[in-house]
Structure formats: C-alpha cells, structure tokens
Amino acid sequence: MRIKVNHIAAVIVRRPWFVLLLLVAAGCSGTHWTNPALPPGQAQIDERECRHSAEEDMGPLIYFPPGTQEYDSPMQMVDRSEQHQRFASLVADCMERKGYRRGDQQ
C-alpha cells in the first residue's frame, strides 16, 4: 500500500494537470434533464441542439492533442476550466429555456 500512495503522490506533484483533469471529469458527469411535457427521447435531441448552439456561441475552443497536457501552463489549465464552465452554463441555460429541469432538482 505504501508504494501505491508514493506513486500517486509523485504523479500529482509531477503532473498537476492530472488533478485538474480529475476535478473537471467529476463535474462532467452527465446532467439528466427532465420535462414531463415532452416525449422521453426529446431531451437528448434538445441537449444536442443546445450543445451545438453553445459551441457556435463560444467560437473556437482551446484544443490540445492527447498527451500534451503535461506541458500545459497553469494559465492554460485555468482557461480550459473556465471554458468548460462557460460551455456547461450555456447548455444549461438553453435547456432551461426549453422548459427542462435538472433531474436532481425537485
């Protein structure tokens, strides 16, 4: 067990982007949207439209090919996190305008 803890600590120290990636991934768990007035499959269609609209509103996003994240600067990580939050907010606003509520809201 001691070896695994030391290995994990070393990964975190050498690659701080990994911690940010885990935090972002935890926040990316899919949102379940509900609208009892619409047929069951409609939420997926509307969410796809809202995601497309958010992509158009935001313009080009920062993209780093897989494997390059370990060279990111802290500012690039912040920029990417802020973009993710803005994108999620735009999608949520769009879905709410269409009459949806998050599944965890009562």
Image (cartoon, helix red, strand yellow):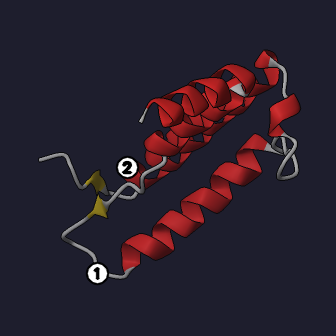
Circle nearer the viewer, 1 or 2 = 1
Q: In this rendering, is residue 1 above or below 31?
A: above
Residue 26 x %, y %: 45, 42
Residue 80 x %, y %: 72, 32
| Residue found 23% across the figure and 55% down from its top | 103
| Residue found 56% across the figure and 68% down from its top | 48
Q: Label 2: which residue? A: 96
Residue type pointed to by label 1: Pro
The answer to which image quadrant residue 84 occupies is top right
Question: Please, which residue is most extreme toward the left here?
Answer: 106
Question: Please, which residue is most extreme toward the front here?
Answer: 2
In terms of sequence position, does the residue under pointer 1 or pointer 2 come before the other?
Answer: 1
Q: In this rendering, is residue 37 above or below 31?
A: below
Q: Is residue 82 visible?
A: no
Q: Nearer the viewer, residue 10 or 44?
A: 10
Disc 2 crowd rating (10 Å Cα; few below 14, some 14-19, many 20+) is some
Give the spatial CA distance, label 1 vs label 2.
Answer: 16 Å
Q: Nearer the viewer, residue 51 or 28?
A: 28
The answer to which image quadrant residue 30 occupies is bottom left
Q: Label 1: which residue? A: 40
